[in-house]
Image (cartoon, rainbow, N blue to C red):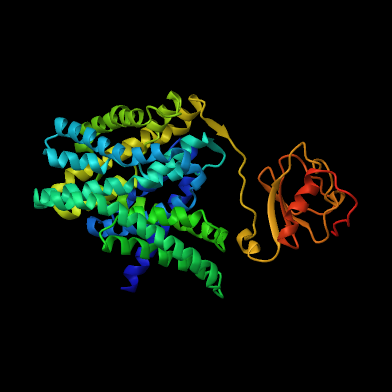
Amino acid sequence: MEEVLNKFLFITSLILLSSIFLSKSSSRFGLPILILFLFMGMIAGSEGLGGIQFENYELTHTLSLIAMCLIIFNGAVETKLKDVKPILVSGTLLSTLGILFTALFVGYFTFLITPLSLEQSLLVGTTLSATDAASVFAAFKDKKAQVRRKVKNLLVFESGSNDPMAYFLVTLLVGYINLGGDQIKQSLILLVVNPLVGMFIGWMLANLFIKVNNRINLEYLGLYPALTLAFLFLCYSMTTILYGNGFLSVYIFGLLAGNQRILHKNVLYTFYDGLSWIAQIGLFVMLGLLVFPSRLVTVAPKGILIALFLIFIARPIVVYLFLWRTKFNNKEKFFISWAGLKGATPIVFACFVATHFGEKANSLFDIVFFVVLASALIQGSSLKWVARKLELLFETIEDPNFPVDIDLIEKTKNGIIQYRIRKKDYAHEKRIIDLKFPKGTKVLFLKRSGQFIIPDGATVLLAGDNALVVTNNKDEINEAIEHLQVEPEATPILNT
């Protein structure tokens, strides 16, 4: 047993290391980083160099649900509510009715060109209807190249919130095929109950988590991520037990928790960002192990037609239909259409179908896998190029968070604020010692062009600098800001 475990750990570590090192060159070749993880799984699989025999759809589906929870939660935590509000209606339409229309379009086209029945073809459509959260989140993690904020916010919100609708449609169709018309009435009831239960439990546990996290005062900092993890999976499991939508519940939980003031938020962000990457790597490698490249060749002619129909016809129709009377211009609509990436989510849904239909679902799984590959290679590899051609891409300077737990300082009597120096400010091109701050006020850090500076009294402040200012008491914050903005009267000099 120990020998088997050692071999497993050895092979797993090699795959993980190879995936990470290959990701360094992914942008050079224009390949999406996650597609490299998928290829690593295919290479390690039964028909690849690794020769690993793995065709357990049920285990894959179970582990995939855990990974998807982590990925969706991390994406939701990083989403700001103020960014969501302007695109809430458009994003909700795309993630609900947009999913339904995409499923119908792709399903009917599949029925026309393949020997699959109408029900099986609609299953193909539903599994391919959702944009993939992991792929879209990864595509926009490059802080040095970003698209316009409202476009990015819509795509991130859509990809994070459309999984519940797609998952519901897949389970509805599977139930209908297995049980026939008797399932319809029950499914229509669930259509209303499912999202409501998910939203309520997500909201309830998010508020409970915030109160517990801020008051529990754990002795060890490392226990706070564990506390969050417990709440996260409690949120998903409780929702599904009550016939609610677990993915929606997790998304609401992460969205609310990420937009409230909680202790040790920076620690949680770092932990879950790393955990999300591990989940994504493991998920894509595992899904790559499932596929048989020889079977992909068989479905390639039909698969490429479905992929092209999805990319160039179904997705654009849906986007232009539901963004018709919005403030998005034609360039932005085209990019939103092009950025409807497919990834792990459709394959996970295909695994769910396979757990119910066994070998009968092989052709469906292979078609879905092929379309995902085509989407990643065609859309994913050209995403930045298309954005640049449409003049939607802009270069940014990486601006990391200050290396202090700001939320923890705010719990003390001290005041703390981040202030960006402007050219019109008195502080511009002045030394810190010349600002004559009130006694006890200090500039802890400066963030300049993405780099941290620990200043002293002789440090000169420049326009664009982001200063982290701390005062003895919260009521002294406004006075400190005044000293940055206008020439102060004679006051005690900051002791540095």
Q: Residue furthest front?
A: 475
Question: Residue 215 at x, y = what percent?
Answer: 54, 70
Q: Which residue is drawn at 65% across and 54% down?
A: 402
185 vs 346, left or right, is left
On the question of residue 161 being in view, the answer is yes
Asked if 144 appears above or below 246 in the picture, the reply is above
Question: Residue 149 at x, y = what percent?
Answer: 52, 37
Image quadrant where residue 62 sits: bottom left
Q: Which residue lies furthest to the bottom in this view?
A: 219
Q: Which of 204 and 418 is in front in this view?
A: 204
Q: Which of 483 and 362 is in front in this view?
A: 483
Total marks drawn?
A: 0
Image quadrant where residue 217 sits: bottom right
- The C terminus sits in image quarter: bottom right
Q: Residue at x 11, y 39 (%)?
A: 117
Image quadrant where residue 442 sits: bottom right
Asked if 119 appears above or below 70 in the picture, the reply is above
Q: Nearer the viewer, residue 481 or 62?
A: 481
On the question of residue 48 being in view, the answer is no
6 vs 77, left or right, is left
38 vs 369, left or right, is right
- The N terminus sits in image quarter: bottom left
Question: Residue 91 at x, y = what percent?
Answer: 39, 39
Question: Residue 51 at x, y = what percent?
Answer: 28, 54
Q: Which of 367 and 445 is in front in this view?
A: 445
